[in-house]
Image (cartoon, rainbow, N blue to C red):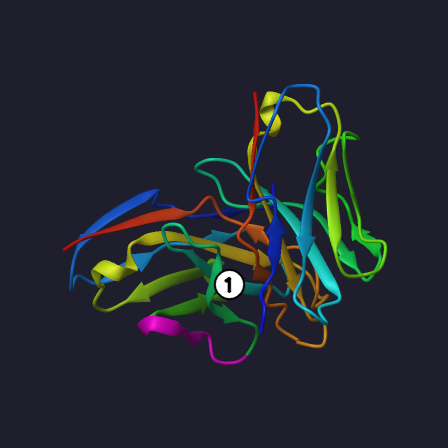
Amino acid sequence: GAGVSQTPSNKVTEKGKYVELRCDPISGHTALYWYRQSLGQGPEFLIYFQGTGAADDSGLPNDRFFAVRPEGSVSTLKIQRTERGDSAMYLCASSSPERDDNEQFFGPGTRLTVL
Amino acid sequence: AQSVSQHNHHVILSEAASLELGCNYSYGGTVNLFWYVQYPGQHLQLLLKYFSGDPLVKGIKGFEAEFIKSKFSFNLRKPSVQWSDTAEYFCAVNPSYSSASKIIFGSGTRLSIRP
């Protein structure tokens, strides 16, 4: 079956602009996660959705970052007034809470570059 | 602070050498433990996981890991590496009783295998 997909694969923007990154999880997965991975680092948790609601948004770095999942499937990560420090790979993952082991399946990521 | 530590940033081995990558975590209580791998140009994928039971866990491609609770460690091993094992390896912890919640990743170990 289809895995997690993310669009765009690459996004180049200018400092101060607004960007949206999209994640399409595996069909039937009710849990969805966003991570950010900077060069040379491991993925860093941003936010976790269970269904339509954000169950844990403790990883969002500041109020410029926001994510939605209005219908409990596709999610959009929104970044306002982008800064050069926002440049990173943004990863999305999904999982099925019916599984006990919380295996998260990752997408290919969106590489964001803020000039 | 709660964290996941991977001691080796870059490991270089020859083919057929044995591998051990260290991982320590600082969370108390019940944890789920993972090793993820990222091959060049590919997205993160699960190598193996520990949830409960036998602390020696077998994964794909001949990898295994041992959970030693007293040492808060989950080291990854492979008796004989191949050139195709060249990748970035991430240890990760799900520090929660909840089956679906965030994963905390280590900073990764880059493994380079000389043919």
Q: Quadrant of residue B80?
A: bottom left
Q: Residue at x 45, y 53 (%)?
A: B90
Q: Is residue A41 above or below residue A114?
A: below
Residue B107 painted magenta: no
Q: Amino acid at mark 1?
A: Phe
Please name the residue that numbered disc 1 is placed on.
Answer: B34
Residue B102 in picture, x, y percent from top left: 67, 55
Q: Quadrant of the N terminus of chain A?
A: bottom right
Quadrant position of residue A37: top right
Magenta span of residues: B53-62
Position of residue A101 in the picture relative to residue B20 (left or right) = right
In terms of depth relative to the viewer, which is nearer, B20 or A37?
A: A37
Q: Is residue B14 above or below residue A46?
A: below
Q: Is A49 above or below relative to A35? A: below
Asked whether the viewer can see residue A111, the reply is yes
Does the stretch in magenta take in B61?
A: yes
Is residue B27 visible in the rendered image? The answer is no
How many numbered marks, from 0 up? 1
Mark 1 lies on a secondary structure that is strand
Residue A65 in the image, given as x and y percentages of width and height: 75, 35
Looking at the picture, tell me which residue is in the foreground, B62 or A21: A21
Please state if B84 lies on the left or on the right of A54 as rendered: left
**Vertically, is A31 above or below A88?**
below
Which residue is located at x 75 percent, y 56 percent? A74
Name the one closer to the observer, B61 or A89.
Answer: A89
| Residue depicted at x 17% and y 61% | B17
Q: 10 Å neighbourhood of mark 1: few (<14), some, or many (≥20)?
A: many
In the image, residue A60 lies at what x, y percent?
72, 38
- Taking the spot 39% from the left edge, 73% from the top edge, the residue there is B60
